[in-house]
Image (tube, rainbow, N blue to C red):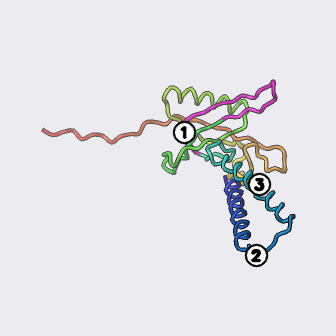
Amino acid sequence: MTPTVVVLTLAYVGVAALLLNLNLGGTTRFGWGIKLAAIVLVTGLYVGAWVGHKGLMGWPTSERMPEDFRLHWVTVKEPDKATGADGSIFFWVRMLDEAGLPQGDPRAYRVPWDEETAEAAEAALEQLEAGKPLNGRMSRQIIDTDADLTPEEGRDYAGNDGTTGSAERPRFEFVRVLPPTLPAKPVPQG
């Protein structure tokens, strides 16, 4: 979402700067080249603002999911062999705090389809449909216990940073949320 906010901010600052320039520089005569460039720039800013708003309107994000989360729903879109379209898995989740309780608003995440993740997601969906709340945890399935397990910033779920081609995909573990334990009620006297 950060690139979207930056693009929208730049778009509105650009439009404001052009309007200020035209309003405050009313006595200045601009050449046709400058006017044409301003028209093209403002038109580009309209397109940028339109695309930016699309990113803010609730579309699933491809950003990294939280390490621990409460799973609300899953949708699996399998790859289409006829058209060659890639598949995706959509998770609707809320972050968990230190106590294991969901916090904040739910968010939709999009993960590239792979068979292992799709099977885990479908098994989790069956439990959700049965009315069992689930917590999820991202697992990298790394054998080296001394390895740094913090996610690298600027990488997507395929592990690509835009310059390299491959890396490991995240794996998900889902566990049923146990009902809360309530304190014992006192026995009434008398």
Q: Name the element at disc 1.
A: strand
Q: Is residue 10 magenta?
A: no
Task: Work out whether residue 20 or residue 113 is closer to the camera in this orientation and state it.
Answer: 20
Residue receiving disc 3: 43
Of residues 118 and 7, the one nearer the viewer is 7
Tell me where residue 171 sits by quadrant.
top right
Give the amino acid type for the residue marked by disc 3 in the picture. Thr
> x, y (%) of residue 85?
78, 31
Picture residue at 81% right of the left edge, 57% below the top: 40
Say if the magenta span includes residue 69: yes
The extreme left residue here reads 190
Label 1 or label 2, whichever comes before in sequence order? 2
- Give the crowd class for mark 2: few <14, some 14-19, many >=20 residues within 10 Å: few
Q: Is residue 140 above or below residue 84?
A: below
**Image quarter (top left, top right, bottom left or bottom right) of the C terminus:** top left
| Eye-nearest disc, 1 or 3 | 3
> Does the image show residue 26?
yes
Residue position marked by numbered label 2 in the rendering: 27
Task: Check disc 3 and report its element: helix, strand or loop.
Answer: helix
Q: Residues within 10 Å of mark 1 (few under 14, many from 20)?
A: many
Q: Position of residue 14 (x, y in %)?
A: 73, 63
Classify residue 179 as left or right of residue 83: left
The x, y position of residue 167, in whole percent, is: 79, 44
User: Measured along the vertical axis of the image, is residue 26 above or below residue 56?
Assistant: below
| Residue corresponding to mark 1 | 135
Left or right of 15? Residue 186 is: left
What whole-number distance in Å separates the C-alpha atoms at marks 3 and 2? 24 Å
Tell which tag, 1 or 2, sits nearer the viewer: 2
Label 3: how many residues lie within 10 Å, few (<14), some (14-19) or many (20+)? few
Return the disc, 1 or 3, that comes first in the chain's sequence. 3
**N-term mark: 3 or 2:** 2
Q: Which residues are magenta?
A: 68-89
